[in-house]
Image: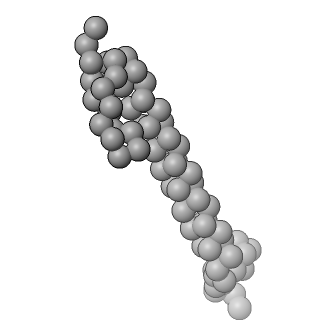
Amino acid sequence: MSKDVVHIDGEDVVVREDTAKAFRGVNWAIVSIGAFVIIAALLLITFAVVGTRDSSTGSPQQGQNSNTR
């Protein structure tokens, strides 16, 4: 069975290849979930800020009759 080296707690540890792949898979899953959470939070904050900003466009009814004021 082939061996592979993984870096755990500051040490290089020799483990089986399937164990190393599983270890890397778990690390990538954690990083991917973290990136998804960060991106979702940034989008939520962006939409909240833009949504609460005061806009001067008015309602659609006011925009339609803007030349009859």
Q: Nearer the viewer, residue 50 or 2?
A: 2
Q: Nearer the viewer, residue 2 or 56?
A: 2
Looking at the image, residue 42 sits to the left or right of residue 13; the answer is right
Q: What percent of the width, then of the height, locates residue 66? A: 66, 84
Q: Nearer the viewer, residue 5 or 24?
A: 5
Q: What percent of the width, then of the height, locates residue 51? A: 66, 71
Q: Quadrant of the C terminus?
A: bottom right
Q: Tally the numbered discs.
A: 0
Residue at 58% over, 59% down: 41
Residue at 35% over, 46% down: 10
Q: Is residue 26 visible?
A: yes
Residue 26, compared with residue 37, is above or below; it is above
Residue 35, compared with residue 13, is above or below; it is below
Looking at the image, residue 7 sits to the left or right of residue 33; the answer is left
The quadrant holding residue 18 is top left
Q: Nearer the viewer, residue 66 or 35?
A: 35
Residue at 30% over, 26% down: 14
Residue at 40% over, 21% down: 19
Looking at the image, residue 12 sits to the left or right of residue 9; the answer is left
Q: Is residue 64 visible?
A: no
Hey, which residue is sitting farthest bottom in the picture? 69
Q: Quadrant of the N terminus?
A: top left
Q: How is the image coloured?
A: one colour
Q: What percent of the width, then of the height, locates residue 21? A: 36, 24
The quadrant holding residue 13 is top left
Residue 34, compared with residue 67, is above or below; it is above
The quadrant holding residue 64 is bottom right
